[in-house]
Image: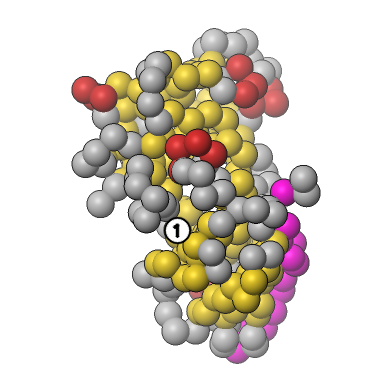
Amino acid sequence: AQSVTQPDIHITVSEGASLELRCNYSYGATPYLFWYVQSPGQGLQLLLKYFSGDTLVQGIKGFEAEFKRSQSSFNLRKPSVHWSDAAEYFCAVGANTGTASKLTFGTGTRLQVTL
Amino acid sequence: DAGVIQSPRHEVTEMGQEVTLRCKPISGHDYLFWYRQTMMRGLELLIYFNNNVPIDDSGMPEDRFSAKMPNASFSTLKIQPSEPRDSAVYFCASRPQTGLGVSGYTFGSGTRLTVV
C-alpha cells in the first residue's frame, strides 16, 4: 500500500529565509508525487507534480521539489519565503496505473512565517 | 472554468438529522473523489467514481454514509443519521481520464460540517 510521511507537523521560518519541507513516501513502483497547499478555509491547490523525467521540478509561487528515489523523498523547497506562503502543505503519492488512481496524502506541515 | 463546485460551504445540523453534501466536478473530468479532513486523521479518501461508477468505497466509515453520482456533472455524499464525530471538512475533487501524473486533482473549496 502507498503511504506518505511528513515528519514536521509545524515549521516556523522568517520572511526571506529559505524553506525545506520534508516528504517521504512508500510505494512499490514508480510513484506520482505531488505537493498541494491549503490556505485557511480553502481547498487544496496543486503546487507541483512529478511523474517522470527531470528529478527537480518547478512549481507555482516559486516552489520546487526534488525527487530522490534512493531516499524515497520528495522535499519541497523555496529559496526565499514570503509572508503569504503561510499555509498548510500536503505531500501526496499516487499510483501510476489507470485503475488505481487515488492519491494518498500525508498529514500535512503547517508553515508559519514571521516578519 | 468554474472549477469544482461544492455546496453548501457550511452546514450545521443536529445529531440524528440527514445531511447531503453536493459536488459539481469540472466538465470533462471522468474521476470524482470525496475526501474528509479532520485534525485527528488528516485527509481521508472516502470514495471515488470513474465515469459515474463507484470504484472504491473502502474509505466510507459506516453504513450511515452513502454517495451517488447520477450523472457526470453531479455527485452527492449523504450522512444519515449524522453524529457529532462526523464533524469535519468534506472535499470533493475531480480529474480527467488522461492520467494521474499528467493532471493531478482539482479540489473544491470544501463543505465544513458541524453536527451538534
Q: Mark 1 lies on which chain?
A: B
A31, A74: nearer the viewer: A31
Placement of the C terminus of chain A among the 4 image quadrants: top right
**Residue numbers of the magenta segment:** B3-16
The answer to whether any part of residue B36 appears in the image is: no
User: Could you say whether the residue bearing mark 1 is in a helix, strand or loop?
Assistant: strand
Residue type at mark 1? Glu
Give yes or no for residue B23 being in the magenta stretch: no
| Apparent side of residue B116 relative to residue B54 in the rendered image (left or right) | right
Quarter of the image holding residue B113?
bottom right
> What residue appears at the point 47 percent right and 19 percent down from the top-left corner?
A57
Q: Mark 1 points at which residue?
A: B44
Measured as percent of width and height from the top left, residue A13 is found at 55, 20
| Apparent side of residue A51 relative to residue A61 in the rendered image (left or right) | left
> What residue appears at the point 65 percent right and 53 percent down from the top-left corner?
B28
Measured as percent of width and height from the top left, residue A48 is found at 53, 29
Quarter of the image holding residue A50?
top left
Measured as percent of width and height from the top left, residue A103 is found at 43, 48
> What residue appears at the point 44 percent right and 84 percent down from the top-left corner?
B63
Quarter of the image holding residue A27?
top left
> What residue appears at the point 50 percent right and 36 percent down from the top-left corner?
B102
